[in-house]
Image: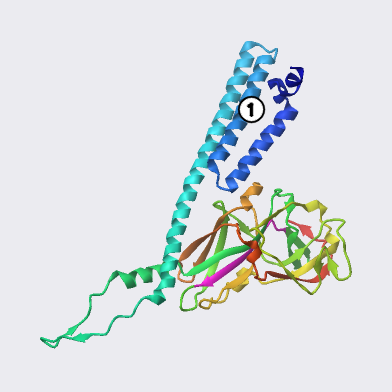
Amino acid sequence: MGIWREHFHPSVWLRWEVLGWILGTAIAIAGLLLFFDQYTGANVCFGITAFFVFAKIAHVAVTTDEALLHRFLFAFLLFGLVGVGIVETMRGVNRWAEKKEKQQAGTSASRQAHEATEKGADVPKEPPVEKGKVHGTTQKPEANPKGPETLDKARVESPFAVSVEWAMFSIGGKGYGTGFWAYYPSQNGCVISPIQAVFFIRVKNLRSTPVTVIGYSLDVFGVPLTRTNMGSIVRIPQKGSAVGPKKMSGYPINKEIHFGQGPGFSMVQFLLNENDFTQGFLLQMDLIENLLKTPLPPNIPIRGWAFYQSPNENAFSLAGPGHITLETDDSRTFPYDFDLRNPHPELDILDRVITAKSFIDLSGCKQL
């Protein structure tokens, strides 16, 4: 039985070099389960994490040579802190699950309203009036007074169809990016700022008249993302990437690059300090915020790119389902949910285009 004791004895599992991997793996799995809305599984992983931490605390308290009082205080304080932390974490997961269920219920109601709007064109016309045979009066069949009101309400509640077709996220935190940067030239030099999330958004006006949008916002998991202040968008490759006179890292100059939809989104991890700032290049594309500045025509979708940064250190807050909120010129706001899951990527035929226009040396720019 020596082999079992050597590799699977509790004292082996509680060594820091082994315990660190166990805790890291459990927390990572919990994060993935949260992304796929598996809240019970995430809480189980958090519970396993707490169990191993408690076991480590108890093991240290039992095996140390300190006085009994010191060991008791050590165990009491750490058990309390870890216990409170894990309980609050699980309660937070449960609250988020309840909030997500309410959001899904609201989305279902909005979708039903949209379906009512689409069916409005199929509402039969009122039948012709008939002359009464006895008194010669005009008789009309009884109308349903709720029909027009319901349709009008549906048109007010759901004036748009909104979706995210494509997205890319950086999952490494503030030291990482997507390879896209915002570039701000000025007379006193230039400034560049890393972009941590890229979206390709489609908006369609469902009303019969043009609609003016005066603002929009985007959140992921209920966390509002910070929209990048628009300068020019540049792509900066990693050091050691192949560079030629007509293309860089697979981006041909003055030719359109088409981005396929794929399963829904991609996660990347580019170290900012590994970017080759001497080999950047300017990009040209349709930005969704520029397209929204003109009134949206009826039933004609607009499609464009949007660039965001995380408001906090949590890298996973950028990747996942969320909401896009549009504000119209009558001060109404309309939230629309999106979920970055595409069950049929092989059916995608839409173009999502970026053009690399020219090379640019950004090594002298200040980084934000």
Q: Residue 303 location, x and y as percent?
A: 61, 71
Tell me the amino acid under the disc marked 1. Answer: Phe
Crowding at label 1, few (<14), some or many (≥20) Cα neighbours within 10 Å?
Answer: some
Q: Is residue 306 visible?
A: no
Camera-nearest residue between 68 and 125: 125
Q: Residue at x 61, y 20 (%)?
A: 75
Q: Where the C terminus falls, by quadrant?
A: bottom right
Q: Residue 270 location, x and y as percent?
A: 76, 53
Residue 11 figure quarter = top right
Q: Main secondary structure of the magenta part?
A: strand
- 231 in the magenta segment: no
Number of callouts: 1
What segment is highlighted magenta in the picture? 194-205
Q: Residue 227 location, x and y as percent?
A: 63, 60
Q: Residue at x 67, y 33 (%)?
A: 23
Q: Is residue 99 visible?
A: yes
Residue 172 vertical placement versus 134 (above, below): above
Camera-nearest residue between 362 and 185: 362
Q: Residue 43 location, x and y as percent?
A: 55, 37
Helix, strand or loop at disc 1?
A: helix
- 198 in the magenta segment: yes
In the image as oriented, which residue stretches furthest toward the left?
A: 134
Camera-nearest residue between 47 and 68: 47
Q: Residue at x 73, y 29 (%)?
A: 18
Residue that badge 1 annotates: 52
